[in-house]
Amino acid sequence: MAQLGTREKLAILADAAKYDASCASSGTVKRSSVGGKGIGSTEGMGICHAYAPDGRCISLLKILLTNSCIFDCHYCINRKSSNVRRARFTAAEVVQLTLAFYKRNYIEGLFLSSGIIGSSNYTMEQIVEVARCLREDHDFRGYIHLKTIPDADPELVHQAGLYADRVSINVELPTVSGLTRLAPEKDATRIEGAMGDMKAAIAETRDAKKRFKSAPSFAPAGQSTQMIVGADGADDRAIIGRASSLYDRFRLRRVYYSAFSPIPDASAVLPLRRPPLMREHRLYQSDWLMRFYGFASAEMEQVADQDGMLPLDIDPKLAWALKFREHFPVDVNRGPREALLRVPGLGVKAVDKIVASRRFRSLRLDDVGRLTVSIAKVRPFITTDDWRPVALTDRADLGARLKPRIEQLELFAG
């Protein structure tokens, strides 16, 4: 490998990390350097291009340790047979970059992943060493997210959890058959075994924390995973079912969906075109409905069409409401919170405000309108003291009436 400067390595390895979407930082513990203790902070807001309450964009250094890899996964631009420019950081270089960026107020944390060099164990040792050095040698208190390698020794993966706020173990593809075909060196059983070990360690540490204040923290922000959408033949119904299973079995904080993007010199087994980005968006919406709105995975799967795909022209919550109209309209003044959460156009915050407000007075349509972006979307599915949808809820063309309008934007609008 040619000798490259730090700036050149950073350009290559930061660009190579852009395909990994699982870098949000919600759920970690609060740490601060107030009083001159340590370096960094995780207080107040998320990291990785999240937005603080005052509008500031918070970022973290998101890089690969190296984009060299001994594996040849068909969908990966950094696969062994790929003709890309390679670079590699040492553990010390990543530590110094993280500290330098933090001191310049560019970042508040680190997201570190890597291709596999030498062996899974050697690569995992280098990743852990970065986190160890930041925490122990420099008392770094910012956010750290490590992408672990399931094939590595379980003790190394465990050490990653001792230093990181969050760990990720990617399942890569929604189906075992897809993983076997497109990433033959990876094993679904080992991946799930590592996720199971991480779940047990997190639960054990939380239990110890309740009994002993001095117990060490272990991945306080939990674990997450990522699935590539559109690289294999898995439909949305299969992806939703897989995500639900992962949440239930491993208590994941997040499942991330990454739409497959065609890569240079791609294998003949890969599709020639990328899936619509709206497909990724609809999967995130269905995921949100399962996590925060009380929808079961089976209900989201019922929204899919005969080909197993979620509709792209309307969101899955509206699609469910149109398919199961017998659950509507819901009385905003008497309906249970669970039923209100299923009303298209009402978010969790709006529903909570409705439930709190109706304790003091009966709500009218205008009151609900102040809590939502589009009252037109809500009206067919609710009743208030001054509003009844009558036959509107059962109209055959209701879906067409509620679809968002497609507007042609002007490139040189005045």
Image: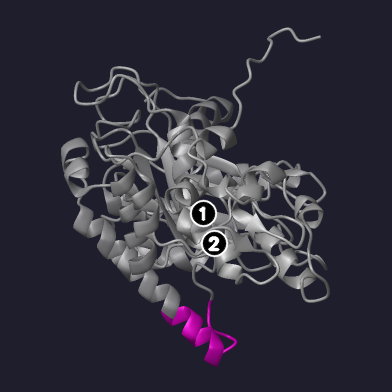
The boundaries of the magenta stretch are 204-216
Q: Nearer the viewer, residue 150 or 189?
A: 189
- The three-letter code of the residue at mark 2 reads Phe
| Residue 92 to residue 151: above or below | above
Q: Which of 350 and 403 is in front in this view?
A: 403
Q: Which residue is drawn at 29% across and 33% down?
A: 231
- Label 1 sits on a secondary structure element that is helix
| Residue 146 to residue 136: above or below | above
* Rendering coords of residue 118 (x, y %): 27, 43
Farthest residue, direction front = 391
* Rendering coords of residue 296 (x, y %): 40, 62
- Label 2 sits on a secondary structure element that is helix
Q: Which mark is residue 288?
A: 1
Quadrant into which the C terminus falls:
top right
- In the image, taking residue 236 as reference, residue 353 lies left or right, namely right
Q: How far apart are marks 1 and 2 (CA)?
A: 6 Å
- In the image, taking residue 209 as reference, residue 140 lies left or right, namely right
Few, some or many residues within 10 Å of mark 2 (<14, 14–19, 20+): few
- The three-letter code of the residue at mark 1 reads Trp
- In the image, taking residue 324 as reference, residue 242 lies left or right, namely left
Q: Which mark is residue 53?
A: none
Which residue has dot 2 on it? 292
- In the image, taking residue 175 as reference, residue 27 lies left or right, namely right
Quadrant location of residue 159?
bottom left
